[in-house]
Amino acid sequence: MNMKQPDHTTFREWLYLEPDGELKAGERSSLQQHLAACASCRQERRELVAFNEMVDESKIAVGQDFTVEVMTGLPATGWETRSPRTWLAAVVAVLLLGIGSALLIGGAGQEAMSAVPIAAAAAVWELLSSSALAGAGMLAASWKGLGIAFQDVLGQSVWNIVAFGVLILCLDLLLLRYLVRRRTADAKSDHNQT
């Protein structure tokens, strides 16, 4: 098996990967052979080792409860600060559906009353609760999926971020053009009416 010899740039990249244990055994041995022959890479490795030692010496020990302190110090996010008003529409809808089902069961007559209306009410309640749970799960998964998709698309290259920025800029300009055109049209119509 004839393997191509890595170039000098690859060896320089391997210098930075070696301290992290990212190199395979064959790559490590190739790097050692290259270091024996290349003075500039040996110098860069000495500087890298000195830098890593300096970083290791300057590390600060973090307390056990550091994560808890940081998380409690953060402000609450938008979805954590829910006021009772945000749930008002959902509560009203559940109450209306419950009252409607009770009226339907109660107004159905003696035949329906003998068919265990409590079981029907429990089935309606189970339907409402499982629908709410499924809706909440789908909403969370949708937002998480959108976030992952955007992260994947925008993280592939800088050009994707630039293209996304240009798209947003064009949409902003289109909106501004629409607003200016509408404002001038309103001003003309006001001027013509007087």
Image (cartoon, grey):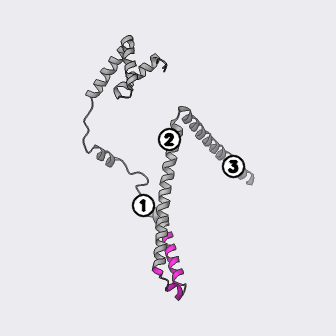
- Please name the residue that numbered disc 2 is placed on: 151
Q: Amino acid at mark 3?
A: Ala
Give the foreground label among 2 and 3: 2
Using the image, determine if residue 141 lies above or below residue 34.
Answer: below
Q: Residue furthest front?
A: 1
Secondary structure at badge 1 equals loop
Q: Amino acid at mark 1?
A: Ser
In magenta segment, residue 101: yes
Q: Residue at x 48, y 81 (%)?
A: 117
Q: Residue at x 26, y 38 (%)?
A: 62
Q: In this picture, which residue range is highlighted in magenta?
A: 93-118
**In front of the other: 94 or 118:** 118
Instruction: Tell me which numbered mark, 2 or 3, is placed earlier along the sequence.
Output: 2
- Please name the residue that numbered disc 1 is placed on: 83
Q: Report the Cα–Cα distance between label 1 and label 3.
A: 42 Å
Q: Residue furthest bottom?
A: 110
In magenta segment, residue 123: no
Secondary structure at badge 3 equals helix
Q: Residue at x 28, y 28 (%)?
A: 56
Q: Which mark is residue 187?
A: 3
Q: Amino acid at mark 2?
A: Gln
Q: In the picture provided, is 193 more to the left or to the right than 62? A: right
**In front of the other: 40 or 69:** 40
Q: Position of residue 88 (x, y in %)?
A: 47, 66
Q: Residue furthest right?
A: 192
Using the image, determine if residue 45 lies above or below residue 127.
Answer: above
